[in-house]
Image: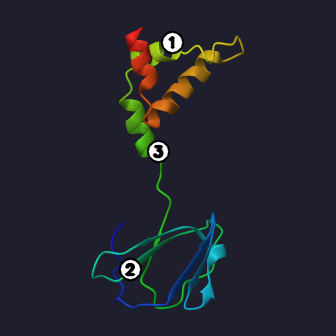
Amino acid sequence: MDTPTTPERTSHVRIAATGPAARLELDGRDISSQVAAYTLNQRAGQLPELLLLLNPATVEGWEGTARVAIGEAPDPGPAAVRFLAAIDPGELERAALGRHDLMDGRSSEFTRALLLQLGEWAAGNWSVLDENEAA
């Protein structure tokens, strides 16, 4: 993400995180309902940066002097295309056919095995592939 080009100004930021919930305030204004996610980052000797990912339904504007970067959720499409293009169809087929956890006679068992295998590989779990190669 590009560094904001607005003049550097600061605001009082308060984050009160309790378990999975957090209350976020900018200059005393509660903005929690407008924020889907946040990241607070600080490098030694520099002003902290607060990155906010707004809820899609947020329509209120921003007003104040906080050094805030507003981001958007990344598009997973290009990463998915690169991941799928790197898959060897033969390895995928062997790995899916080697899965006995989904061979239950229900409909679409092969497709379910393919999708589960791809999901495991996408998560970095290559152990199923290694086990099949050892057999």
| Number of other residues with Cα within 10 Å of mark 1, as a class: few under 14, some 14 to 19, many 20 or more | some
Residue drawn 66% across and 74% down? 33
Mark 3: secondary structure: helix
For badge 2, the amino acid type reads Pro
* Label 3 close to label 2 by CB (< 8 Å): no
The x, y position of residue 1, in whole percent, is 36, 66
For badge 3, the amino acid type reads Gly
Q: Determine whether 102 is above or below 10 in the image.
A: above
Q: Determine whether 29 is above or below 133 in the image.
A: below
Tell me which corner region of the image, top left, top right, bottom left or bottom right, holds residue 37.
bottom right
The x, y position of residue 58, in whole percent, is 63, 73
Mark 2: secondary structure: loop
Mark 1: secondary structure: loop
In 3D space, how far apart are the residues under numbered discs 3 and 1 (Cα atoms)? 28 Å
Left or right: 108 as drawn, with respect to 15: right
- Pointer 3 residue: 77
The x, y position of residue 70, in whole percent, is 47, 73
| Number of other residues with Cα within 10 Å of mark 3, as a class: few under 14, some 14 to 19, many 20 or more | few
Q: Residue furthest front?
A: 19
- Pointer 2 residue: 48
Q: Determine whether 131 is above or below 123 in the image.
A: above
Left or right: 71 as drawn, with respect to 103: left
- Pointer 1 residue: 98
Left or right: 61 as drawn, with respect to 80: right
Which one is in front in this view, the residue at disc 3 or the one at disc 2?
2
Give the mark nearest the N terminus, 3 or 2: 2
